[in-house]
Image (cartoon, rainbow, N blue to C red):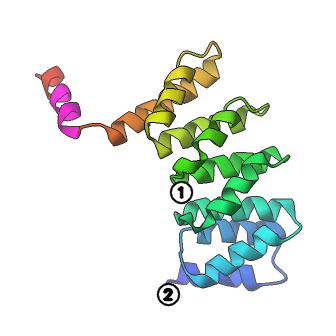
Amino acid sequence: MSRAYEALLASCADTDETAGVWRRSLESLGYVCNEEVFDLMRKAFSSGDEKSRVSAVFAMGRSGDACWEQQVRGELASPNPELRFEAARACGELELPEAVAELEGLVEDEDREVQQAALGALGQIGGDKARLILRRYCRSADEATRAAAVAALDGLEFMGGDLAEIFGSLKAEAG
């Protein structure tokens, strides 16, 4: 294993480490998909500490493993806006099409950052329903909502578009 991985694990095992360092170490380990890291995520998620739970949801999204779907989607309805934000972001990272309807509801959340995370997640998930939602919000009277929807739709259409068509139009413009 790499020295960075070992150092991050050591931070998580060190009971003298501050809670903030422990949480950031867990978030950094989110990219590592092994049982040891997954155990740390489960421990943080089931702890009574809200900030540890936020870090766990963040790491779950980073893992890219849909095994976390139930936990992540459950936090979309959290009373804590920080958890709703991370859950929305994680749904996008995990590309959970089952979460599209819930994310659509979060676009109207009282918290602006949650709204933008939901729009971004819809762009990452893709599909016809997500595309329709994003197109609707591209016409929003609210400038920030409109900008977030346009950015998410641009990303979705780039990732789902025909690259030959994109590069052909760029070549014609440079022509």
- Magenta segment range? 163-170
- Residue drawn at the location 55% of the way across and 81% of the way down: 34
Horizontally, residue 167 falls left or right of residue 131, namely left
Q: Quadrant of residue 18?
A: bottom right
Residue 8 point in image, percent of width and height: 64, 78
Q: Which mark is residue 1?
A: 2
Horizontally, residue 89 falls left or right of residue 110, namely left
Check disc 1 and report its element: helix, strand or loop.
Answer: loop
- The residue indicated by pointer 1 is 94
Residue 61 point in image, percent of width and height: 59, 59
Residue 17 point in image, percent of width and height: 81, 77
- Residue drawn at the location 64% of the way across and 64% of the way down: 59
Q: Give amino acid for label 1.
A: Leu
User: Marks 1 and 2, how far apart in space?
Assistant: 25 Å
In the displayed structure, would residue 20 be above or below residue 119? below
Q: Give amino acid for label 2.
A: Met
Check disc 2 and report its element: helix, strand or loop.
Answer: loop
Report crowding for label 2: few under 14, some 14 to 19, many 20 or more residues within 10 A (C-alpha): few
Report crowding for label 1: few under 14, some 14 to 19, many 20 or more residues within 10 A (C-alpha): many
Q: Quadrant of residue 162?
A: top left
In primary-sequence order, the first of circles 1 and 2 is: 2
Which SS does the magenta portion mostly show?
helix
In the displayed structure, would residue 140 be above or below residue 96? above
Q: Report the quarter where the C terminus lies.
A: top left
Mark in the foreground, 1 or 2: 1
- Residue drawn at the location 44% of the way across and 35% of the way down: 128
- Could you say which is closer to the camera, residue 21 or residue 144? 144
Q: Which residue ends up furthest to the right in the rendered image?
A: 48
Q: Which mark is residue 31?
A: none
